[in-house]
Every structure is written in C-alpha cells, then in structure tokens.
Amino acid sequence: MKISAQEEYGLRALLQLARAETQGESLTLGRIARLEGISTANAGKLMWILNKAGLVQSQRGTKGGYRLARPASDIHLNEVISVLDNERVEAHCKSYTGVLDSCVHTGDCGIRPVIVELHQIVDNALSEITLSQLLGTEATVDAVLHKIQSTKPRAESIHAQV
C-alpha cells in the first residue's frame, strides 16, 4: 500500500494538532505549514478537507486557529486515511495506463479481490491505531504498534482457488 503525500501530511498535521491539544492550544494555518514544511496553501487545503470531514474545527479571531474536533484517542487512522484518500480501492482500474480507453479486465478481474482484501487488511490494522498512540518518540510509537500487533490473531493466508 502506498501512502500519498496528502495522506501523510494530513496525518502529520493532525498529530501537530494533537500535540497542541495536550497544551490547550490551537494552531494557525501558518504555524501548521511551518511545523510541517509545507505551503500555507497546502496546509489550508488539508485543513479544509479535515474540517469538512469533522476531524478538525476552526475558530476565527486573534485566539483562533485549528483544533481537533474530538480527542486524539477517538480518532482512528483508518478514518483519517479514508477522508484523505483520493483514490478508492473500488476505482483501482481507473488508474489504468494502457493503450486502450479502459482496462480490459473491468468485467471479470482476478486481481481485484486481492487488492480489495489487502486494502481491507490495512484498513482493519489502521482501525486499531489512534492519533494519541502516535504521540511520542519513534521508539515509543514503535513499541505501541508492536504491542497492538502482538495482541491480534494472525490473519489467515489467502489461498487462490483455481
């Protein structure tokens, strides 16, 4: 699975807001942009998408800025990725780059179930991780993720039926 720049920077912006939340602060677009090394326009686009989805709230005025709409412990990564994902799994053939107008396998594709299943596995894994679990050092986050992984039963192998 590939994480797009929009998904990554959206997650990073939400983590900045989660950190600010622990100190009772909100962040301006300019500050989010500076903290993440992105343009203010890009930060604005991300905040617009996240605000529209109900993940962040904005407040105007001198003490205004952006805040998480819910506690970081209530925001799961699969929800964030779903909001920021430009290309849904169901539309994977739309990225077809062959010489014809569309993919020749749109009616009966043996690859589609594999792609859908892989995305479901990733979605299930991301549904177990909250923004609050990503606050901390890389080592502590890695330990948290390994702890989550070790408490889950192993996924059954995918067997192709011919």
Image: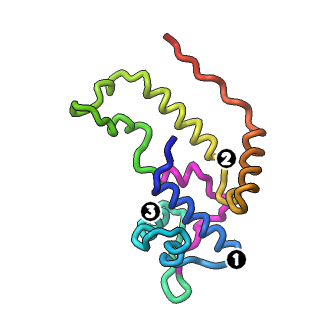
Q: Residue at x 38, y 23 (%)?
A: 109
At label 1, the amino acid type is Gln
Q: Residue at x 54, y 33 (%)?
A: 118
Disc number at residue 128?
A: 2
Q: Which residues are magenta?
A: 65-83
Where's residue 62, x and y in %?
A: 52, 89
Q: Residues within 10 Å of mark 3 (few under 14, many from 20)?
A: some
Horizontally, residue 52 falls left or right of residue 142, namely left
Is 28 covered by the magenta stretch? Answer: no
Q: Mark 3 to mark 1: distance in Å?
A: 24 Å
- In front of the other: 157 or 34: 34
Q: Identify the mark nearer the N-term, 3 or 2.
A: 3
Q: Identify the mark nearer the N-term, 3 or 1.
A: 1
Quarter location, residue 63: bottom right
Which SS class for mark 1?
loop
Farthest residue, direction top: 162
Structure colour scheme: rainbow
Q: Residues within 10 Å of mark 1 (few under 14, many from 20)?
A: few
For label 1, the residue is 23
Is 67 covered by the magenta stretch? Answer: yes
At label 3, the amino acid type is Ile
Where's residue 150, x and y in %?
A: 77, 39
Quarter location, residue 67: bottom right
- In front of the other: 34 or 149: 34
Q: Residue at x 39, y 37 (%)?
A: 92
For label 3, the residue is 49
